[in-house]
Image (cartoon, rainbow, N blue to C red):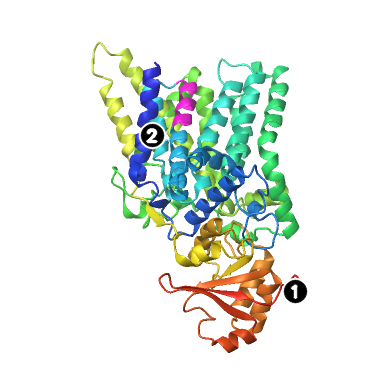
Amino acid sequence: MRAREALAALGLLLLAMLALRLPPWGLGEAIVSGTEPCGTVPLAMAWTLGWSFDRFDAGLSGYWNAPIFHSTPGTFALSEPMPLVAALAWPAHLLGASLAAATNLALLTQLWLDGWLVRRWLRRLGVGRALGTAGGAIVVVLPFVHQELGVLPLVPVWGIAWMLTALHELLGPGRRPSLRAGVELGLATGASWLCSEQLTFFAVLLLGPCALALLRRRHLVRALPLALGSAALTAGVGVLPVALPQRHALSSLGLRRPAKSRREGGARPVELARTPWRGLVPLPSSLVAKRPSDRAFEPGPLRTVVALGGAAHGLRRRRWRRPVAMLLVLIVGAALLALGAHLRLGPFVPAEGLARVLPGYDRIRSVFRAVVLAQLGVVALCTVGLHAWRTRQRLHRRRSPRGWLAPALVAGLAVVELWPPAPHVTSMPDADARWVSWLRDTEPGAAMAWLPFAPSGDVCDFEPTARMMVLGLELRHPLVNGYSSYFPGRTDRTARDTRTLPEPRALQRLRGVHTRFIVSPRDGPLSELDASTLAALGVEPAFDDPDAGIVVVRLLEPPTGDGP
């Protein structure tokens, strides 16, 4: 049995490497960026891991005060810190792996955990060992996950699978509420939150309806409140140390999502029926996205058809009725959540009601991401359907000695049905450039600004900034600009004023946020000024790297305050 488990684990790992097109000898050359149109978000993910490694090495000192948006405190709370993802990749950093290699290993680890924990969940539901492995393999190549490979917190769904496993242990058929199951549910919720806050938030919202689908009269015993209380307390240990600093940082800076962004973040009904790329089953072009990065959330027509068969079988069998009902609640509930503001009941918009009464919901921009829970439910029902078919063939083995071949073939086709396209990759910035070496050894700790600031709010305009964030980990100079889920108001004002360079007002704004160095391309806004003009502005050339096309200048006047 141990050999089979090891073989299943190795198979899922090899499948993840194959899906990522990630050779072991090329881990440190570039980072996988999935379907992202540019390198901004993948580089920001690598920076998040790099900063986490740096703070782990320092015993978590200054963890929340990341070196971006200088001098705003608590900037690491402006995006998902995913500390557990970083902790699982930290050993690679300790062994000397480059940041690119550690980032790719973190992604690979999360994909493998997705498959393994989903396999464990399906096994607890009652699916056979081979079909459980097949279900885990489908999740390793799940369409949603491979659309979002460049957004690392959207890859770990294993925590949600663990939560559903613990819920089954708590309220599943033949189970009775216990303290152990409650603690496991709390541990799973905390672990999931430390990997992916958004996905865990959606899962917690649906956990109650899923529990009601499983609940029977015999579960209503004294042990149930104790189990639920232990789950809440245990989850709080993992959630609160991260959630409270984030809430404080966002509240102190007055940062909220505008209602328009929440409305645009919902999935349209047609997107739920569209596949992100072509698969084994021929579909009309209207049901296939034009680009893999487009919103398209159908997990695969073959998987869906088999899942419908699994639902029909389960609802007719007493053994499967409540688990299948729970999966249907998960699928329907996740799909409704994903619709967001596109779901209307006459004049009432449920998403807007949730934003008013549910803490945290108003800060979620892309509610369409809840659809990943629906895809997990479809995979589970698909394996239930295959399990029912395999059981039926086993009962008729005498008439068909090789009756297992058809279910096995369909299971294999379900794994590869929507095989993901080769992901994009993003190169890392050159940390060996001469200007980097010079700045690393010059006035450590002095703040620097990268010019130009992003000219618009388009994500791809921030790629040079994201590259400077990664280099900033080497330079040990805090960066005045930056990229995150939220932007402090001071940064927006600084970006607006620096677009007027070389006007004195722009330089005064940079001095107001304690900038010492300005790093820019050689054709930047200060490059055409002669030495006397620069001196009159209080600026002196500091270093020129023609090979890299970068110049560094120093602001001579000392900081005078917090700026206008």
Query: 232 or 280: which is nearer to us?
Result: 232
The answer to whether residue 139 is left or right of residue 422 is right
The answer to whether residue 151 is left or right of residue 490 is left
Q: Secondary structure at mark 1?
A: loop
Residue where numbered disc 2 is placed: 13
Residue where numbered disc 1 is placed: 560
Q: Tell me the crowding category of disc 1: few under 14, some 14 to 19, or many 20 or more residues within 10 angstroms, Cα based.
A: few
Which comes before the other along the chain, label 2 or label 1? 2
Q: Residue at x 30, y 32 (%)?
A: 412
Q: CB under 8 Å between callouts 2 and 1? A: no
Query: 164 or 321: which is nearer to us?
Result: 164
Task: Tell me the amino acid under the disc marked 2.
Answer: Leu
Q: Residue at x 46, y 59 (%)?
A: 431
Q: CA distance from mark 2 to mark 1?
A: 55 Å
Task: Tell me the amino acid under the disc marked 1.
Answer: Thr
The picture quadrant where one finds residue 169 is top right
